[in-house]
Amino acid sequence: MGVFFRIILTLLGGILGYQGVSVLELPFSSPYLIVIGTALGALVGLLLSPLVDNMFRGLLKFHLRDILSGLIGLVIGILLAILASIPLHGLAVENGYLSLLVTIMLAALGWTIGVRKRDEVVSLFQKSNIGSPLVGKNSGVSAKILDTSVIIDGRISDITKTGFIEGSLIVPSFVLAELQHIADSSDVLKRNRGRRGLDILNKIQKEPYVTVQILEHDYDDTHEVDAKLVKLAKELGAKVITNDFNLNKVCELHGVSVLNINELANAVKPVVLPGEELRVHVIKDGKEQGQGVAYLDDGTMIVVDGGRRYIGETIGVLVTSVLQTAAGRMIFAKPKAMEKAL
């Protein structure tokens, strides 16, 4: 805005000064007084122009949702002021200053509440399911935001295929940009991972249970994708689907709901109880002397006490204990042959 904005406000101030002197109709009014009033008005406009300019620049930094929710609060505040002015007409206030003061106070209060309660205001319109780009095929189902790691991981495609995840899957433009950047990497491994992520997105778009939406939305005040994901989830009232441990913790700190693919994978693993018998293939040594290590089909590690002698063989084992760790589930067992020997 700059100089042009100051010129406009100076001219506007001069016009208001001229009109003010003309309306007052002073008994000693003269052309000189009109000139002085116009000059004073122009001076006031010039002095106030930096303040108004900064106000407009600050307003432009607001997110569109903040402005819209603030305007809604402003309109409600003005309507309440109109209703409140009705009983004020019965008071002995002929100049209307009290009504003007009440209007300004309620309008400012409405704007403040509208901006601070933005999420609640936006959620009211999202729940209507009318023309909202953030609502999927199933009403009442909250939207989910996919992060880069869970797209590259690929298991989200299998989960959506089963129908366990419904509603809208949102892929922000900054996540898609990161995927494209990885796919164009000079490193072969990164390039393959990026291309795999793009292929996974194409597969998910064909699933009947979900709607994949590319959301053209970004934040200029931060370059971290995780921080942008948290901000977007808070604005939309959506959940974040990830398998990134650090992002999971950050979302929890900000009160954002998270659907962690790794936690889901651990939760659906078959339950193995002490005393059960299993058939496993021992493939390598364990950390302790005499131990052997085997794996179930879902990747669960089985530590076989005394199983070193059976490396390369498929044997029957008896489960002795099950340990749940942050990395997953570990099963401890011993060969059935050893149990029979005892």
Image (cartoon, rainbow, N blue to C red):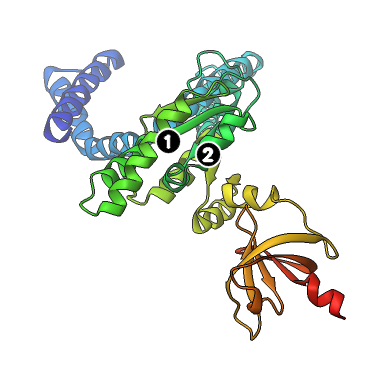
Q: Secondary structure at mark 1?
A: helix
Residue 153 visible in image: yes
Give the side of residue 318 with respect to residue 102, left or right.
right
Residue 6: x %, y % from top left: 16, 32
**Numbered label attached to residue 115:** none
- Residue 130, compared with residue 55, is above or below; it is above
Q: Amino acid at mark 1?
A: Ile
Residue 188: x %, y % from top left: 26, 52
Residue 20: quarter of image = top left
- Residue 29, compared with residue 36, is above or below; it is above
Please tell me which residue is depicted at 52% across the width and 33% down the height of the picture: 236
Residue 153: x %, y % from top left: 46, 46
Residue position for label 2: 156
Q: Quadrant of the C terminus?
A: bottom right
Q: Quadrant of the N terminus?
A: top left
State how far apart marks 2 and 1 are (Cα).
8 Å
The foreground one among 65 and 113 is 65
The foreground one among 153 and 289 is 289
Residue 219 visible in image: no
The foreground one among 229 and 34 is 229
Residue position for label 1: 200
- Crowd around label 1: few <14 · some 14–19 · many ≥20 (10 Å): many
Please tell me which residue is depicted at 24% across the width and 54% down the height of the picture: 187
Q: Amino acid at mark 2?
A: Ile
- Crowd around label 2: few <14 · some 14–19 · many ≥20 (10 Å): some
Looking at marks 2 and 1 on the same chain, the residue that comes earlier in the sequence is marked by 2
